[in-house]
Amino acid sequence: MRFIKGCLGVMAGLVLLVILFFVVLVVNYRTGWFDQETTRPVQSPDGTYSAYIGMRGMMDNARCRLYIKKGGERARRVLDLYRGDLKWSPDSRKVAVVSMPYGDSATIWIYDVKTNRSCRAEVNPAFTEIAADQWMVKWDWAEFDLIDFRAVNRGNLGAVNEQSVPLLRCQVVEKGSGLVIVPHKGIEDPPGTRRGGANK
């Protein structure tokens, strides 16, 4: 009899541990309390904010969250996204995260720290006549609301006369109460290339 009671007690304890484990997973998924930093915090140009990407949950490395921190305040979770490259706009107002898992396509997430507005767009900055093993696609803010994609020769990375080809320029536009990312006409298409587009 004691043996049976002991076994039942052990089983009840194991069930409680399993339930507690799943409760922790759900709480972390919803709140990000236990999220881990997957990128080093990147400080805004004016030094007011910092941003980093945290792992979303304990068992999924691909899905992440964007966190914004101001001074000594606690970091705020502002966006769910995929792991990517994070950069601040020159005016320290917007954060852009670009994920390019397939090389020829990209997803852009934008978050505005002043208005708490965000947007997302799929773009295709790829072009046809340069081998993928010799070139890579890089991006950066061109101005406060413009993002440029360009192809860079891997053999000239970091060189003074870095060989690159402009591919696509996107613009972050305020529309109503939100933001949208649209193709911008201020970049010329080099010969033999095709321009990607942003889906609103």
Image: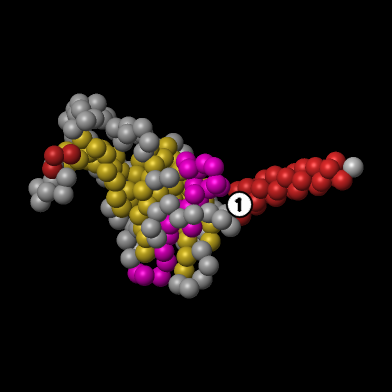
Amino acid type of the residue that numbered disc 1 sits on in the rendered structure: Asn
Q: Residue 166: image x %, image y %?
A: 22, 40
Q: Which residues are magenta?
A: 46-67
Q: Which corner quadrant of the image does residue 95 belong to? A: bottom left
Q: Nearer the viewer, residue 58 or 44?
A: 58
Q: Nearer the viewer, residue 122 or 77?
A: 77
Query: Is residue 60 on the magenta stretch?
Result: yes
Observer-nearest of 166 and 176: 166
Where does the image place residue 2, in percent across and percent down from the top left? 87, 45
Vertical order, 46 against 40 (above or below)? below
Residue receiving disc 1: 28
Q: Is residue 70 visible?
A: yes
Q: Is residue 33 above or below residue 108?
A: below
Please identify the residue farthest to the bottom as the structure is shown. 72
At 54% across and 42% down in the image, what residue appears?
Answer: 59
Sort mark 1 into few (<14), some (14-19) or many (20+) by Cα contacts within 10 Å: some
Picture coordinates of residue 176, whole percent (x, y): 53, 51
